[in-house]
Image (tube, rainbow, N blue to C red):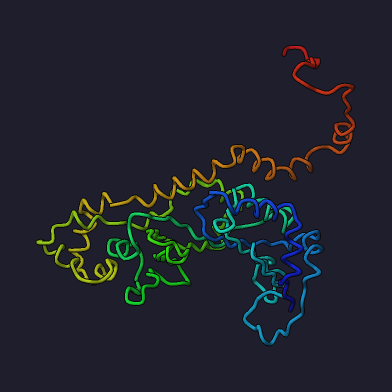
Amino acid sequence: MYIYGGFMLQHTLEQQDIIKEIQQNQQSAIRCPYDGLKLCSTRLPCKEFLSIVSGARQQINYQTNQKQFYLNMLFSSYFRVYWFPLKNGVYKTKIEINPNTQKLTPFQLIKVVEFIMGSCDEVFVSEFDEKVDLNILTAKEVANCLYVQYVRSAKDFEERQQTYYYGVRRGSLTKVYDKAKQLKLVDKVLTRIESTRKINSNSRQLLFDFIIDKRDDAFKRLVLIDIEKIDKRTLLGRALNKSTILQLKYFKLNGHLKKQLKRHIGYRYPKIDLHQLFKADLDEWLSMDLELRVKIFVRKHYEMFIKSWPSERRTKYNSIKFRQPVTSNVKLPLPSGW
């Protein structure tokens, strides 16, 4: 088993053009709505990438890492790459990258994957974290009005001032925590709601398709109920007036009160529409590359175009030379009928 890391790897990567672009972004205001991506591929990393990182390889004893599924593991501050599986039924390559932390634009994310894999063909999204940040509600206030559909478990860590968990790690997991405390921001409110989505192997999208997806399903299962609209004198209001997070209160309601809550105006018109907030962040992120869809189309169909183009025409096209520079002042002969 081999590990790639340390100063040698970091120094080598920092000499690459795409990594230099990432470093230039660190002072920018780029915000990506995805706080983490896990990609998988049926191909191994390209030869150029393996040649670049080969000098940072270190051999370790397999017996101390029996839980690992890959022969090669690369750990850098920009991304993680695992390749050459040790067990059957595992993708040949797995990539972990956080486009929000690295402040990547959509096209830069594609370029990073192309740097590792050579191209984005057969690169699928297996898991991702979608997030929204709130600067008007604390983590406790969010937990007191957040309802997550189709969740059977929730953990309240209010006493230790840690993260509120909804769901299980093996499935869909939602987290609410104080991002301002994590970033060491003084006298500021910044609460992050983060939802982990694991995609079934039969439903995984290509990275190209995932990036430009409209994501109409984002945060649809999460509702910030406007508790203030529920009369505390009613049976439902008294049931929800206990000192614990809303999700745990919901578990204790009977069937009639659960239906009454979902029909209430405070549920149908939530305090904050998380879906629209995420969509606004997604649209802003995608707008950073105005020609993104054209670039993706070209990269997605380039190989097919080259293979379908006859070799004799390709040679003739490459041999075309202009006697003078082509500008707006140059008049080219056009076919009849134009």
- Tell me residue 136's x, y (percent): 33, 54
Q: Is residue 132 above or below residue 299?
A: below
Which residue is drawn at the image coordinates 41% and 66% (left, top)? 175
- Tell me residue 259's x, y (percent): 21, 60
Q: Is residue 210 left or right of residue 93?
A: left
Which residue is drawn at the image coordinates 43% and 72% (left, top)? 168
Judge by depth and name the residue closer to the eye, 32 or 154.
Answer: 32
Which residue is drawn at the image coordinates 46% and 72% (left, top)? 169
Which residue is drawn at the image coordinates 46% and 65% (left, top)? 184
Residue 234 placement: quadrant:
bottom left
Instruction: Report the residue that reaches farthest toward the bottom.
Output: 63
Q: Is residue 268 left or right of residue 92?
A: left
- Tell me residue 248's x, y (percent): 28, 71
Q: Is residue 151 above or below residue 120?
A: below
Q: Is residue 246 left or right of residue 202?
A: left
- Tell me residue 330's x, y (percent): 80, 16
Instruction: Report the residue that reaches farthest toward the top.
Output: 337
Which quadrant of the figure contains the C terminus? top right
Judge by depth and name the residue closer to the eye, 136 or 155.
Answer: 136
Residue 53 placement: quadrant:
bottom right
Which quadrant of the figure contains the N terminus? bottom right
Q: Is residue 57 above or below residue 114?
A: below
Instruction: Report the residue that reaches farthest toward the left.
Output: 233
Question: In this figure, what is the number of numbered marks?
Answer: 0
